Image (cartoon, rainbow, N blue to C red):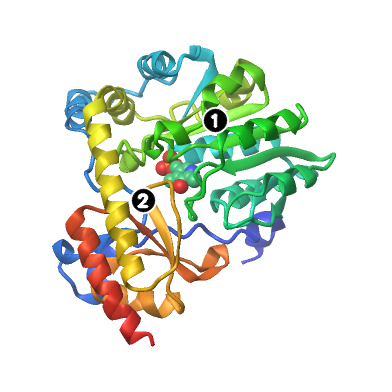
């Protein structure tokens, strides 16, 4: 169709994001019962959401005919208190994916460049390409970010650097010292987007006090999400913390009502339920040990992970994945990341992990 040729070439060149396969889709394709399927493909919380978050949603159910609070006052007030920032430093997003795109729209355009690492989260190249900017991918070191290479890649036209910590799909983590040292060396004219989608899973001694850095580095944007440890992926809610002037720019490219009313209410309640969050983290820690012990038993190499998923090297990942799907187990192939021998598996509940490991053992036998 001629019309489509008028879409900018950089838009037409975008390779669409590949989401994890929904349970209902696999059930249809393989003629399986939905309740027999285990989905460990999208780093979702296997415990679901806090009961307090669900109750809060019921309270706003009758108000869905009204637009949400476009400024998210109650949620921002709760976030400001929890993280010790001002309301004007917070930008709400329809998932943190949305705030990543806002950063791209506010700071990138054709003729500028953004830097991200090999094996880093797939949304960074997508967001960069969608606004016609040039993406610069720096080589990874041990599957993680090589900050020296990223510094060296900075050009006159570089406006944004994306960093995921921990990174998805590799689970690698940068330490506070190296990150702070990096921020000290990045020119103040380059925005650093520090994506901390999995930060809640980190033990205290491994996590960075990144929010304190906002005072020192006005070019820093921290992004967080309610999709992972808080178990609210379906509601789509994330946020950015930044210098007020940067936050103001992000808000200008934000859709007026991008954070919906159910999500706002649920998030406020979820943030107050520390006990639930702790339980989720404990289950994840135990599950991570169960799954990686299983890998060791099967003689498989994996990338040590600080998040709620782990990438394991299985050889012919496409064949192993196909066998897992036939057995009703959905994990995530990562060939689109250039990791054609790995599969990424989210940590589930004990019984889900057991089913995955059993299916994996069968799949490995079949793919030999
Ligand atoms: C899951 C994920 C996100 C956030 O997803 P949203 O659901 O849009 O908040 C952001 N960054 C990374 C690295 C992720 O893995």
The tag earlier along the polypeptide, 2 or 1, is 2
The x and y percentages for residue 249 are 63, 24
Task: Check disc 1 and report the residue beneath it.
Answer: 222
Task: Check disc 2 and report the residue beneath it.
Answer: 43
Q: Residue at x 49, y 41 (%)?
A: 97
Is residue 7 visible to the viewer in this orientation of the structure? no
The x and y percentages for residue 104 are 64, 39
Q: Residue at x 18, y 72 (%)?
A: 32
Q: Is residue 139 left or right of residue 255?
A: right
Q: CA distance from mark 2 to mark 1?
A: 20 Å
Q: Quadrant of the N terminus?
A: bottom right
Label 2 crowd bin: few (<14), some (14–19), many (20+), radius 10 Å: many
- Quadrant field for ligand 1: top left
Question: In the orientation shown, which residue stands out farthest toward the right?
Answer: 156
Q: Are marks 2 and 1 in contact (CB under 8 Å)?
A: no
Whether 239 is drawn above or below 16: the answer is above
Q: Residue at x 43, y 46 (%)?
A: 306
Whether 247 is drawn above or below 38: the answer is above
Looking at the rendered structure, the number of numbered marks drawn on it comes to: 2
Q: Residue at x 36, y 40 (%)?
A: 227
Viewer-closest of 245 and 256? 245
Whether 300 is drawn above or below 206: the answer is below
Q: Is mark 2 within 8 Å of ligand 1?
A: yes
Q: Secondary structure at mark 2?
A: loop
Q: Is residue 39 left or right of residue 343?
A: left
Label 1 crowd bin: few (<14), some (14–19), many (20+), radius 10 Å: many
Viewer-closest of 122 and 220? 220
């Amino acid at each position: 169709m001629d019309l489509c040729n008028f879409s900018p070439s950089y838009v037409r060149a975008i390779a669409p994001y590949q989401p994890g396969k929904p349970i209902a889709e696999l059930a249809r394709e393989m003629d399986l019962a939905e309740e027999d399927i285990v989905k460990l493909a999208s780093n979702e919380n296997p415990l679901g959401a806090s009961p307090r978050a669900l109750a809060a949603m019921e309270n706003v159910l009758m108000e869905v005919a009204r637009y949400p609070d476009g400024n998210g006052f109650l949620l921002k007030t709760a976030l400001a208190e929890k993280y010790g920032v001002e309301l004007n430093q917070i930008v709400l997003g329809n998932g943190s994916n949305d705030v990543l795109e806002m950063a791209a729209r506010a700071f990138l355009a054709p003729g500028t460049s953004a830097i991200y690492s090999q094996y880093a989260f797939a949304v960074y190249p997508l967001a960069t390409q969608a606004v016609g900017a040039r993406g610069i991918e720096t080589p990874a070191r041990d599957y993680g970010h090589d900050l020296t290479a990223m510094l060296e890649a900075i050009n006159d036209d570089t406006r944004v650097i994306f960093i995921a910590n921990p990174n998805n799909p590799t689970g690698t983590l940068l330490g506070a010292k190296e990150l702070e040292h990096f921020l000290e060396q990045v020119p103040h004219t380059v925005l650093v987007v520090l994506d901390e989608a999995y930060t809640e899973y980190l033990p205290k001694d491994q996590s960075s006090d990144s929010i304190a850095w906002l005072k020192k580095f006005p070019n820093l944007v921290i992004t967080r999400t309610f999709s992972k440890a808080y178990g609210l992926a379906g509601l789509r809610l994330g946020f950015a913390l930044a210098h007020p002037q940067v936050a103001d720019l992000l808000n200008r490219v934000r859709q007026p009502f991008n954070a919906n009313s159910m999500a706002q209410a649920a998030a406020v309640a979820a943030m107050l339920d520390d006990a639930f969050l702790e339980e989720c983290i404990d289950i994840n820690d135990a599950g991570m040990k169960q799954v990686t012990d299983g890998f060791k038993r099967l003689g498989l190499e994996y990338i040590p992970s600080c998040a709620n998923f782990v990438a394991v090297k299985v050889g012919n990942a496409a064949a192993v994945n196909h066998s897992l799907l036939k057995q009703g187990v959905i994990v995530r192939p990562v060939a689109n990341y250039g990791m054609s021998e790995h599969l990424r598996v989210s940590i589930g509940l004990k019984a889900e992990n057991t089913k995955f490991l059993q299916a994996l053992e069968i799949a490995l036998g079949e793919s030999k």
